[in-house]
Image (spheres, rainbow, N blue to C red):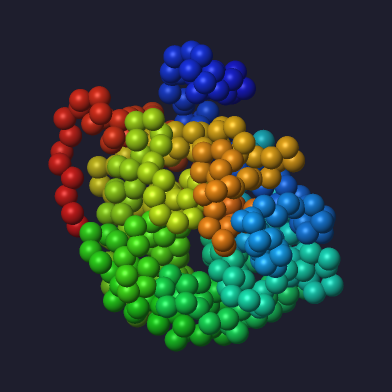
Amino acid sequence: MNERREFLHQLAAAGLIGAVAPATGEEDRAYWLRVMTRLADPVLGNLAARRLKERMPVESVAGTREDRSQYTHLEALGRLLAGMAPWLELRPQGGEEGVRRQKYADLARQAIGAATDPRSPDYLNFDRGRQPLVDAAFLAQGVIRAPRELWEKLDRPSRGHLLAALKATRVIKPGFNNWLLFSATVEAALCLVGEPWDALRVDYALRQHEQWYKGDGVYGDGPDFHWDYYNSFVIQPMLIDVLRTISRATPDYAALGEKVMARARRYGAIQERLISPEGTFPAVGRSIAYRFGAFHLLAQLALLRELPPGLPPGQVRAALTAVVRRMTEAPGTFDAQGWLTIGFCGHQPKLAERYISTGSLYLCAVGLLPLGLPPEDEFWRAAPTAWTAKKIWTGEDLEADHAL
């Protein structure tokens, strides 16, 4: 049944038939899982076999391949696991989905082992150049989101290697912008697993982002405002995860955590309104090759059951599914071997900044965070409903939008 529906959706996308009836939550979840595993298979499968460097292509801007080859493999691992982690952590492990989840959790642990073992041919770079700080932070965010599967179940040598890798990034000076949160996220993960952590790096990042808050749910990326999706790619999700993690060790940040979540709900409401009736959204700002990773924050709010008032889970699921489907099914999104290609809607290499390469693209996985909710959660059980733009553009009379 799901394969038939997928075929019908493809025909509808090609304009060969009319629109297909909305999918059930069960069908949506099955589709999201297929997207997640399609992303995961080449990365985790090859890294677990210690052949990632050998087999992963490095698509990049002309003249940058040698440079990006130093970082792209850690990008793929860290960004993929930041998105997969809540699903890997989900219980129980029984049933068809549970068996599949156990398979990928095992692969993820093997991949972490291969990436952090100095004797591995796939030992990755955690301390040369500046980029490793970014993707060590996404890997740390994965550990924060799945401590049982990605930390407690690691074998003892892999734990030691992972700790050494995360601590190695401390030699990298973060930029005076969202990069402060990369340092903070690494320290938060160390705090979570009971290691000594640098509270000053965390506090500095949090205080500076308070200074950079611009209003109506939006932060500057450093002192200046940038019209892009970095409030969702990095800033607000990492603020939330850092505060939730360190608050278990110190109560000092409870009031800040409440403010940050209120702002996040407002930005989440804005994000939902950006999704057009057709499941598209504005291709504005840098890093748009991260595709539906642009909805990291909205997906995180759904995962944490912190969606804004008046924004029901079934509506958010329908909107996000439309975006994921639109981008994933675009011809050229994957190459013949199943790796992501550079682009926004298909293969569009001219859209890449100089820091973009194959591994970077796996940040799209964070748009799938609600897979960490069980199938019986309202997010998956609720009937799909039209999202805000779809309602407005069909003439429905809605309440006016208001600033925070």
On screen, residue 226 versus residue 132, left or right, reads left
Where in the figure is residue 123, as x and y percent of width and height? 77, 68
Q: Answer above or below: position of 38 versus 287.
A: above
Residue at (73%, 74%) from the top-left corner?
161
Q: Answer above or below: position of 326 versus 184.
A: above
On screen, residue 70 versus residue 2, left or right, reads right
Q: Is the N terminus in the top left, top right, bottom left or bottom right quadrant?
A: top right
Where in the figure is residue 379, as x and y percent of width and height? 42, 39
Residue 215 visible, this angle? yes
Q: State which quadrant residue 343 falls in.
A: top right
Q: Is the C terminus in the top left, top right, bottom left or bottom right quadrant?
A: bottom left
Residue at (83%, 68%) from the top-left corner?
120
Q: Which is nearer the eye, 39 or 284? A: 284
Q: Answer above or below: position of 367 versus 397.
A: below
Residue 365 visible, this angle? no
Q: Residue furthest front?
A: 63
